[in-house]
Image (cartoon, rainbow, N blue to C red):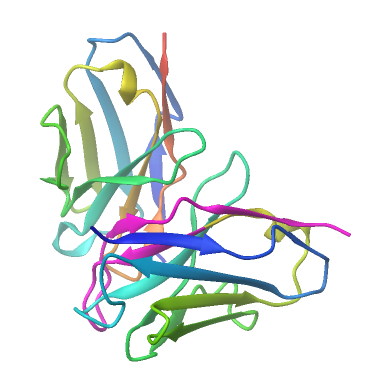
Amino acid sequence: QVQLQESGPGLVKPSQTLSLTCTVSGGSISSGSYYWSWIRQPAGKGLEWIGRIYTSGSTNYNPSLKGRVTISVDTSKNQFSLKLSSVTATDTAVYYCARDAGSFLEWDRFDYWGQGTLVTVSS
Amino acid sequence: EIVLTQSPGTLSLSPGERATLSCRASQSVSSSYLAWYQQKPGQAPRLLIYGASSRATGIPDRFSGSGSGTDFTLTISRLEPEDFAVYYCQQYGSSQTFGQGTKVEIK
C-alpha cells in the first residue's frame, strides 16, 4: 500500500519561499509510470492543483502559479519536493501531495494522497 | 481550461435517502476522464470514482457514477452516516481541473 507524508515548516514569512517534502513509502517512487503532484486547499475552499513531476524529472505546473513553483524529485530518498517563492497570505492553505495515476504525458486521477500539512504565511 | 461547475452547492438529506450530485463541464471531457472524490473534515480527499463510472478499490457499491460529454452525476443510493461530506469532481481529459465541491449535510 502506497503511503505519502508531507513535511516542512508550518509557518512561512511573506515574500519568503515555502518548501515542503513528500516522502513516499510502500513502493519506490521510480517504479511504475506515475506522476507525483502537489495540491492545496485554503481553509473552507476547494482544491487547487499546483503541479506535478514524473519520475524522469519532467514537470507540469499550474499556469496561475507558474514562475513561482518548482517541483523536484529525489529518487534515492523516495521523496519529491515543492518550492513556492514570493509567498503571500493567499498562499496559506493545507498542502497535499498525491500520486497521479497517469503515465507519461497523460493526465489521470489522484489515487493516493498524503494527510496534508497546513502552511500559514504570516509575519 | 475546462471549468467544472458542481450543483447544488449544498444538499440536505437524511440517512437512507438517495443523493444525486451534478458536475457540468464547460466543454466536453474526452473519454469520460472524470473522477469523484469524497472529503471529510480534517481529512484528505478520497478517490471514489474514475473514468466517470468505475469505482475505486474498496468503495461501496452504493456509490455510482454516470455521464459523458459535459454532464456527469454521482449517485449515492442510500446515504449512510459516514457519507455526509464534501464531494469534488475532477476532469483529467485536458490537463486537469476540480469542481468547487458539493456538501452533503444531514437534514
Q: Position of residue B28 (x, y in %)?
A: 24, 59
Q: Is residue A15 left or right of residue A78?
A: right
Q: Position of residue B14 (x, y in %)?
A: 33, 8
Quadrant containing the N terminus of chain A is bottom left
Res B82 → quadrant? top left
Above or below for B50 versus A35: above
Q: Position of residue B64 (x, y in %)?
A: 14, 35
Quadrant containing the C terminus of chain A is bottom right
Residue drawn at point x = 44 percent, y = 84 percent: A73
Report the residue that reaches farthest toward the right: A123
- Numbered-mark total: 0
The answer to whether one can see residue B11 in this image is: yes
Above or below for B60 versus A107: above
Res B95 → quadrant? bottom left
Q: Position of residue B94 (x, y in %)?
A: 30, 69
Residue drawn at point x = 39 percent, y = 45 percent: B45
Magenta part of the protein: which range? Answer: A96-123
> Quick one: B48 or A23, which is closer to the camera?
A23
The answer to whether one can see residue B2 in this image is: no
> Quick one: B89 or B63, which is closer to the camera?
B63
> Quick one: B94 or A123, which is closer to the camera?
A123
Q: Verify whether residue B87 appears in magenta.
A: no
Above or below for B3 versus B19: below
Q: Is residue A103 left or right of residue A89?
A: left
Residue drawn at point x = 27 percent, y = 65 percent: A26
Residue drawn at point x = 14 percent, y = 27 percent: B62
Above or below for B106 versus B30: above
Q: Verify whether residue A97 appears in magenta.
A: yes
